[in-house]
């Protein structure tokens, strides 16, 4: 990540702004943090990123703020206005590349640009059983794709590619589809 590579259980990151150019390789790369705690309990709040994130050689879980947000972590009151160039990478998101049973709320993206194989403008990949991943009161601006690229939400891991069909997102704005 731009500031932190990974986080330990119960991490707390608040009131931080990151800008500049970040080069990364492999998996779990983010403008602020590469990967949240796999033990859960982490909180990220009041965060702003405006980075040019360049992934060398491809990878997965690439995000403007955090690459991978796993297992009972929360990100709130965040904003990303980043440019992400990820080539052959998968799971690229303006805020989060991938999230597993975690929560995003009160977050939004500005004019995020993403180049890479698979992308979503808030999160690319959401997976969750019990409790499932949630995005609430969040939106993306100027996205040519949906705010969330793919969601696997049920016990059968059914992929849902249209955020408007998933009730975990209470509000989003996609200016290409008002």
Image (cartoon, rainbow, N blue to C red):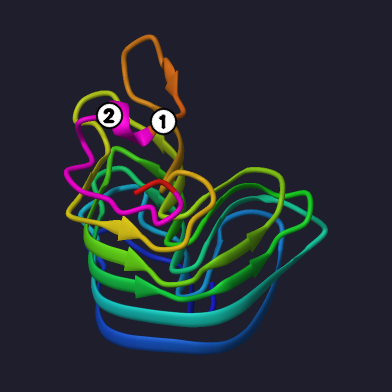
Q: Is residue 169 magenta?
A: yes
- Give the mark count: 2
SS at circle 2: loop
Please give the name of the residue rendered at 49% of the width and 83% of the height, measured from the top-left corner. 50
Please give the name of the residue rendered at 46% of the width and 52% of the height, measured from the top-left corner. 176
Residue 75: x %, y % from top left: 26, 61
Q: Is residue 74 magenta?
A: no
- Give the residue at mark 1: 162
Q: Is residue 170 left or right of residue 35?
A: left
- Give the residue at mark 2: 166
Which one is nearer the viewer's eye here, 145 or 44? Answer: 145
Chain part drawn in magenta: 163-176
For residue 97, above or below residue 23: above
For residue 85, above or below residue 174: below
Please give the name of the residue rendered at 54% of the width and 72% of the height, measured from the top-left corner. 1
Please give the name of the residue rendered at 35% of the width and 55% of the height, measured from the top-left corner. 37
């Amino acid at each position: 990540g731009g500031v932190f590579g990974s986080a330990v259980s119960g991490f707390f990151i608040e009131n931080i702004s990151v800008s500049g150019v970040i080069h990364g390789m492999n998996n779990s790369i983010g403008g602020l943090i590469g990967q949240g705690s796999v033990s859960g309990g982490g909180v990220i709040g009041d965060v702003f990123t405006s980075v040019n994130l360049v992934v060398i050689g491809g990878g997965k879980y690439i995000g403007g703020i955090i690459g991978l947000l796993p297992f009972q972590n929360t990100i709130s009151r965040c904003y990303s206005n980043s440019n992400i160039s990820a080539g052959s990478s998968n799971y690229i998101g303006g805020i989060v590349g991938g999230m597993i049973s975690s929560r995003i709320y009160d977050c939004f993206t500005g004019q995020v640009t993403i180049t890479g194989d698979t992308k979503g403008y808030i999160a690319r990949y959401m997976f969750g059983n019990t409790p499932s991943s949630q995005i609430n009161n969040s939106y993306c601006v100027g996205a040519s794709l949906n705010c969330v690229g793919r969601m696997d939400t049920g016990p059968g891991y059914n992929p849902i590619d249209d955020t408007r069909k998933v009730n975990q997102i209470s509000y989003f704005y996609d200016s290409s589809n008002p």
